[in-house]
Amino acid sequence: MAEVSVPSARTVNAQRLTLLLEEAGWHLVGGRRGIYNRLAPPGSEPDLSGSLVVPLDSSAPEYYELMHAALSLLSSPQYYDLWQRDISPRLSAESTDEFRFRKDSAAPSGLISWKQGEGLIESARATLVAGAKSFMEPGRRYYSNRHGQFANRYLDTVLMGQTAAGSYVITAYAPANISVPLKGSQSQVLGLEGVDLTPARQVSAAIVKAVEATVEALEHHRATGSLSGFEARVESGVSYEMVTALRGITRDADEAEISIEWDPAEPVDDGPAALFQFRGSDAAVLEKVGSRFAAAEPEEHLTVTGRVHLLTKKEAGGPGVFGIETLGKPPRKIRVRLSSEEDYHGAVRAHDQDLAVRVSGDMTREGSMYWLYNARLVEVLGDYMELAKPTMQPEQIEGQHGLFDDFAPDN
Amino acid sequence: MEARSADGVDTLRIRPVVEATFTKCMEQLQEGYVGSIAATAGCLMTRVDRDCYGMDVMFVRVNSAEREEVSLYAQLKSTTTLKPDPSQEYFSHRFKRREHMQRLVNPRTSIKAILIVMATHPHQRLWSAGDHESLSLLHCCYWAALEGETVPAGVNSPTVRVRTANVFTAEALSGMLDRLERGEELHG
């Protein structure tokens, strides 16, 4: 059995410990008000054997001795599961807000099929990320990679908890009083709230707001058959990314739930907790909404000229993808996915004979790679080496613009 | 000349029934003794992890809904080398380790602690005797409240004085718990 470390009695809050024990099924069997709580484990005899004394009066000279004794007992092998799963992760003095993502699973209680489990974790992550992006820029339907680094910094502050007994549950502990830098570390100079930093709690609140808005829109659709509720709530954080994440959670299950429990030490106006429920039928609706939002996105149309430096096919008989290295200075690498397979021959020929090509398509960025989708091989040009000579200017073509000028640098 | 076993029991004087478990049986006898006293006083007694608390048991008097429970820790010590003379006001008890005494003298406000010393007969076979009427146990448990006293510096095995009048009975235990409920100290 792994070593468990006993946290310092100085960092543990007695009320919090009592709360955690009660949540785990222990009950208050006695004590003295303001002095100590006596708690007994579930199913224990009324003779107080096995009961635990949690000291409450931190001004008492023996307070730390009693607290240390309580923690030692709870972290002993007898209570290993309880300690590891329910108590230890939530005991630290740092306030944490708790998200729970629950999906009904056909597998026995506490289990989920492997792939579904992976999918649930991915979707839970995607929900947090989508909400974080809507915090940075509310009112956007489609974020793509915008604010990806900020979302990552928020995610860095979040802990994933062990799943609880019951249907499969993923818990995310987000700090209530830690701040997340708004910009990358180099630009964080002042360390001021609102200027360089934002409390993680506010990001969590934006996530909850977006989930809630989506649930409302789903209810509106159930009542009226109209998807207009989603459009109306884009300002509240309903986005392509959010509906896609939630679709992942609701898919292939009869029921799913997301809940938030705010740390009681840092109360929230709207109440200590909220629960959002989804049905299996919601997945199809969310998919429809996602397609709408993606389709509505104005395309960035681009034409580039360059050398085919890479040819690749994922599977035999499948569509070919090729990579272009542009003629501009500095040369950029772009992947191209053609709308028509016939054009691929042209790319192969250009690759073989070192010919330059001109390609036109819808630009998007995935990670650090630029892509052209629905692309058309406009023209296979002459010898690349000739065209690349410094005397040649990049040709002015209508519709072509400076590749990387108009794109907001990602934070 | 005295011979002592590894745990300090005077091996020349004792007559165990089973030598290997003699010391453990002394503890068991004392637990039975104080457990009976506690039951008579309407208190529950629970064993406590000695390594954690420096105490062996806790007495808990659970009260009706209007009143809260009151509890008291006790460190149990048992010896065969002692039979206090009631005509003397005090007898002496020696702690094997300094920290045992320290735990009892440290100030406490949440839950108080007392020492209970049992004087036991060296012949194990004589420890208890019973018939239809009653059970008798040899010999006697005495209690002491040491909070506020000082552990003498540089002494590994400090000694304390215990009043012979402090026989641990149900009345004594009830009286202590009543005083604790009223917020009074226990010294005496």
Image: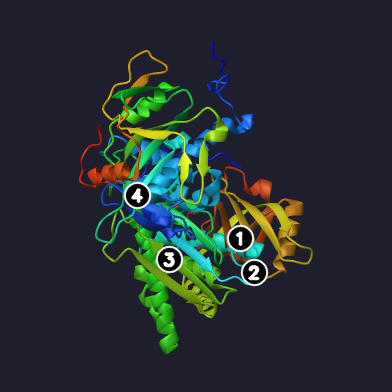
Q: Which residue is mark 3?
A: A259
Q: Give the residue at the far bottom of this rendering.
A: A224
| Dot 2 crowding, Cα within 10 Å, few <14, some 14–19, many 20+ | few
Q: Is residue A261 above or below residue A82?
A: below
Q: Amino acid at mark 2?
A: Ala
Q: Chain of mark 1?
A: A
The answer to which of marks 1 and 3 sits earlier in the sequence is 1
Q: Which residue is mark 4?
A: B41
What is the distance, in whole Å, between disc 3 and disc 2 at their CAs? 22 Å
Badges 1 and 3, same chain: yes
For residue A107, which numbered disc appears in the image? 2
Q: Nearer the viewer, mark 3 or mark 2?
A: 2
Judge whether residue A239 can be spotted in this image.
yes
Q: Nearer the viewer, mark 3 or mark 4?
A: 4
Q: Which residue is mark 1?
A: A118
Q: Nearer the viewer, mark 4 or mark 2?
A: 4
What is the distance, in whole Å, between disc 3 and disc 4 at their CAs? 50 Å
Badges 3 and 2, same chain: yes
Local SS, label 1: helix
Q: Where residue A132 sits: x, y (%)?
A: 41, 58
Q: Which one is in front, A166 or B1?
A: B1
Q: Where residue A275 sits: x, y (%)?
A: 41, 70
What is the distance, in whole Å, between disc 4 and disc 1 at their CAs? 59 Å
Local SS, label 4: loop
| Dot 1 crowding, Cα within 10 Å, few <14, some 14–19, many 20+ | few
Judge whether residue B48 can be spotted in this image.
no
Q: Would residue A156 appear left or right of B182 to someone viewing this image?
A: right
